[in-house]
Image: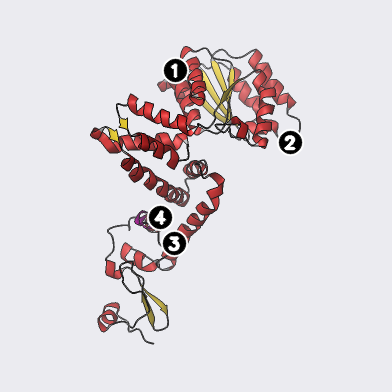
């Protein structure tokens, strides 16, 4: 497995502490970036000294000269320091950046032996088949090779072939003493578009789900993973509503990194707009419980119950409760003197005259 082989090579360098002064992670595969970061923390940064040993910078916010100065300065509190630097694309923006690249080269020739410098170039994507790389990304990668690649170790964070992902799923389950059906492993990879970060996250949930059964079937994957894909947009809506910018961007990145990619972006935007329209209706109609919630949102403008509860909880915290009575689900005025039963349990949703009992229960006579 090519992608995993390169990952194992870097991890072995970290474990053996045979490191170069600086590395550059090229690619946007979050799974490998997380794996590398965990390996670095485990083998190079003591847990009780991480506040003094681990630093994250972004070249869009911090000047390169300041970062290099921090890297060169030995720490009195930590025996070893690690610096992660994002925003590499700023080194290749408009204008001349030769002095910045020269400063990095100068540092690599005379580095701090008690520090590791890691640049993260996640602004380009490397597909499993390098021949299919976007021309723009290919040009960016070549520029990195010709500049930073001359004095920094390059580690590719490429996407994984689906066949390799299926093998990884089977091997990981074996290491956890779990048996997974071949069709289940394929469905897991296919449903998540080969996104290794999402695959690993959902696999952990599946392992917890099967518990003592120690066996993951195709049915388990269909039950858990397909439901997870539906929940992702609602989780994004929750993050936006709670103004959690970091979590919202992480969820959005995960959604857009799936096999559907940007081609499905219009569908995601539509679902988001639909959910926020629901919350607007909830506010305008002063909804305070689920009985009124189901009555306020007409048929065709509803989504699964988890989304309705999420919308109600966002607008009216603490009001999401038991499911409403079926009979009260959707008696909504459709114009002067008309009422339409939009309950999903109704056999006939055509306009009709209300009964006397209905008039009495509502407290208001509907007239023609």
Q: Position of residue 86 (x, y in %)?
A: 58, 31
Q: CA distance from mark 2 to mark 4?
A: 43 Å
Q: Which is more N-terminal, label 1 or label 4?
A: 1
Q: CA distance from mark 1 to mark 3?
A: 49 Å
Q: Which is more N-terminal, label 1 or label 2?
A: 1
89 falls in the magenta region: no
Outermost residue to the right:
96
Res. 56 image quadrant = top right
Q: Do callouts 2 and 1 mark residues in contact (Cβ within 8 Å)? A: no
Q: Kindly identify the residue that appears in the image at 65 percent across and 21 percent down.
A: 149
In front of the other: label 4 or label 3? 3
Q: Which is more N-terminal, label 3 or label 4?
A: 3
Residue 94: give its label: 2
| Local SS, label 3 | helix
Q: Which is more N-terminal, label 3 or label 2?
A: 2
Q: CA distance from mark 4 to mark 1?
A: 42 Å
Q: Position of residue 171 (x, y in %)?
A: 38, 26
* Residue marked by disc 3: 278
In front of the other: label 2 or label 4? 2
Q: Which is more N-terminal, label 4 or label 2?
A: 2
Q: Is residue 245 left or right of residue 71?
A: left
Q: Which residues are magenta?
A: 303-309
Outermost residue to the bottom:
368
């Amino acid at each position: 497995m090519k992608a995993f082989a390169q990952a194992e090579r870097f991890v072995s360098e970290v474990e053996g502490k045979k490191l170069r002064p600086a590395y550059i992670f090229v690619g946007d595969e979050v799974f490998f970036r997380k794996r590398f970061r965990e390996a670095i923390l485990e083998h190079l940064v003591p847990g009780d000294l991480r506040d003094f040993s681990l630093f994250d910078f972004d070249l869009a916010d911090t000047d390169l000269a300041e970062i290099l100065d921090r890297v060169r300065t030995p720490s009195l509190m930590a025996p070893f320091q690690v610096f992660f630097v994002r925003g590499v694309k700023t080194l290749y923006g408009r204008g001349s950046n030769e002095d910045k690249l020269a400063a990095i080269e100068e540092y690599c020739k005379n580095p701090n032996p008690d520090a590791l410098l890691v640049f993260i170039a996640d602004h380009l994507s490397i597909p499993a088949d390098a021949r299919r790389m976007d021309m723009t990304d290919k040009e960016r990668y070549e520029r990195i090779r010709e500049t930073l690649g001359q004095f920094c170790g390059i580690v590719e964070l490429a996407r994984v072939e689906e066949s390799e992902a299926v093998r990884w799923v089977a091997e990981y389950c074996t290491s956890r003493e779990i048996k997974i059906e071949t069709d289940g492993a394929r469905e897991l990879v296919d449903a998540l578009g080969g996104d290794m970060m999402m695959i690993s996250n959902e696999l952990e949930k599946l392992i917890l789900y099967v518990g003592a059964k120690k066996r993951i079937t195709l049915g388990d994957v269909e039950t858990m993973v397909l439901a997870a894909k539906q929940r992702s947009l609602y989780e994004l809506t929750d993050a936006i509503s709670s103004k959690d910018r970091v979590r919202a961007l992480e969820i959005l990145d995960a959604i857009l990194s799936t096999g559907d990619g940007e081609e499905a972006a219009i569908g995601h935007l539509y679902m988001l707009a639909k959910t926020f329209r629901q919350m607007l209706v909830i506010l305008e109609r002063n909804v305070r419980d689920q009985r009124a919630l189901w009555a306020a949102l007409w048929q065709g403008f509803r989504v699964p119950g988890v989304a309705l509860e999420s919308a109600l909880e966002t607008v009216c915290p603490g009001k999401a409760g038991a499911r409403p009575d079926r009979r009260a689900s959707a008696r909504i005025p459709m114009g002067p003197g008309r009422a339409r039963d939009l309950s999903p349990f109704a056999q006939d949703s055509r306009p009709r005259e209300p009964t006397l009992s209905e008039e009495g229960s509502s407290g208001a006579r509907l007239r023609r």
